[in-house]
Image: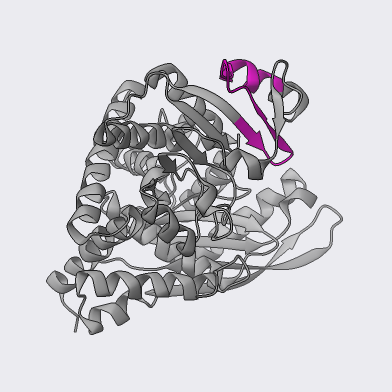
Amino acid sequence: MAETGAQNNPFEIAKKQIDIVAKVINLNDGIREILKAPKRELTVNFPVRMDSGEYRVFTGYRVQYNMARGPTKGGIRYHPQVTLDEVRALSAWMTWKCSVMNLPYGGAKGGVICDPKHMSKGELERLTRRFASEIAPIIGPEMDVPAPDVYTDSQTMAWIMDTYSMLKGYSVPGVVTGKPIAIGGSEGRGEATGRGCMYAIREAAKRQGLKTKGATVAVQGFGNAGSVVANLASKELGVKVVAVSDSRGGIMNTKDGLDIAKVEAHKQKTGQVEGFPGAQKISNEDLLKLDVDVLIPAALENQITSKNASLIKAKIVAEAANGPTTPEADEVLFKNHITVLPDILANAGGVTVSYFEWVQDLQGYFWTEKDVNERLESVMSASYRAVADSAEKYGVNNRTGAYAIAVERVANAIRLRGIYP
């Protein structure tokens, strides 16, 4: 079987994953067909006034994949390579992610084809507000709730929330999540993805009888998720982080481990982790092969492939990134008795706290960071146990176990609701 690389159509991969899990859970063919097609797709072409005074036309998408379990949820990305099939695939994966975490959501995704690195703040604001007004008829707290994604952030969400609110004539904080706290954002949202991943690692270690105190950890990708999970796992689980990397390269200290707070300060000052005092250089590729207890791929997709999967020595691979392991590599890791915590579980802390933010907005009642973290811990722990039990029940790897739960929950909602009219 040919390896599925980044050049393959992501939506075809998403549909194949449904076919694979359909056989495992013996899914009805009719329901399978429903699950392989997005419910709603909107393509918009809209003008934006650039700083030069000229107008440029941009293309944007919003795909709502499935609403059987509730309003759809998913990010909006700004990137030159955004395609409709990519957005379709991401909306499908958001559906399964929300379902495996048992959140009352379906999945959605959006994107605008643009290069934000070559746009001013004013241009980005005008683009965001115009795109928000174009998709406004199909978003809202009861219908579809966007969030930040690649090259979008809390400021982007503030502009969308304000634009939508102006159209409605009153403030609607629940239309988006990932907002600044001052306008209805949630405490704990910033570190939620890394914190959720840390809880998943803790639960997996417990199940394996692996002591986290002193356990060795390597992190590929020292960005938001990677640096947070490294920091929290060091402080709260007592692990020893021996290697970290970013896009420019990595560092390791297998003897004493790395002081993560100092590595963060070094990266802030120099823009990279390389050159950290008392650490050796290591490449991103070699970091994956280190003999550690826990490996955290927190960078790009397709990092663990059929070429290097047999060289992975970690006991637990926790996917803080989206899609870092190819299906062929999954098979190799499973045969080698390596526990993979799949992305739709391991990095679902972000969408879980986004759900908490939405709940707080709808109630107009806000929680403390302690409340948020305790609730996140509860949801992550329960979801990990459900996934591990499902994998055991069907005799499959954790990814297929997670998909089995997610797809079955959505299929069950479709069956119970029926087809109207």
- Specify the quadrant of the image occupied by residue 373: top left
**Quadrant of the frame with the C terminus:** bottom left
**For this rendering, which residue is in front, 296 or 12?**
296
Residue 114 in the image: above or below residue 346: below
Q: Is residue 27 above or below residue 206?
A: below
- Asked whether 111 or 227 is in front, the reply is 227
Nearer to the camera, 212 or 18 = 212
Q: Position of residue 358 (x, y in %)?
A: 34, 43
Residue 254 % position (x, y): 58, 23
Left/right placement of residue 123 relative to residue 415 reads right
Residue 70 appears anywhere in the view:
no
Q: Which residues lie in the magenta part?
A: 244-266
- Examine the structure image and report whether residue 98 is included in the region drawn in magenta: no
* 386 displayed left or right of 362: left
Q: Is residue 50 above or below residue 153?
A: below
Q: Does residue 304 show up?
A: yes
Residue 284 image offset from top left, x and y in percent: 66, 42
Up-down: is 22 above or below 291?
below
Residue, far left: 416
Where does the image place residue 62, in percent across and percent down from the top left?
50, 66
Task: Residue at 37% x, 38% y: name it.
Answer: 353
Q: Residue at x 48, y 58 (%)?
A: 329
Residue 121 horizontal side relative to residue 12, left or right = right
- Report whether 245 appears left or right of 291: right
How does the figure colour the protein chain or chains?
one colour
Give me the residue at 19% from left, 49% from top. Answer: 389
Confirm whether the magenta stretch covers residue 250.
yes
What number of labels is visible?
0
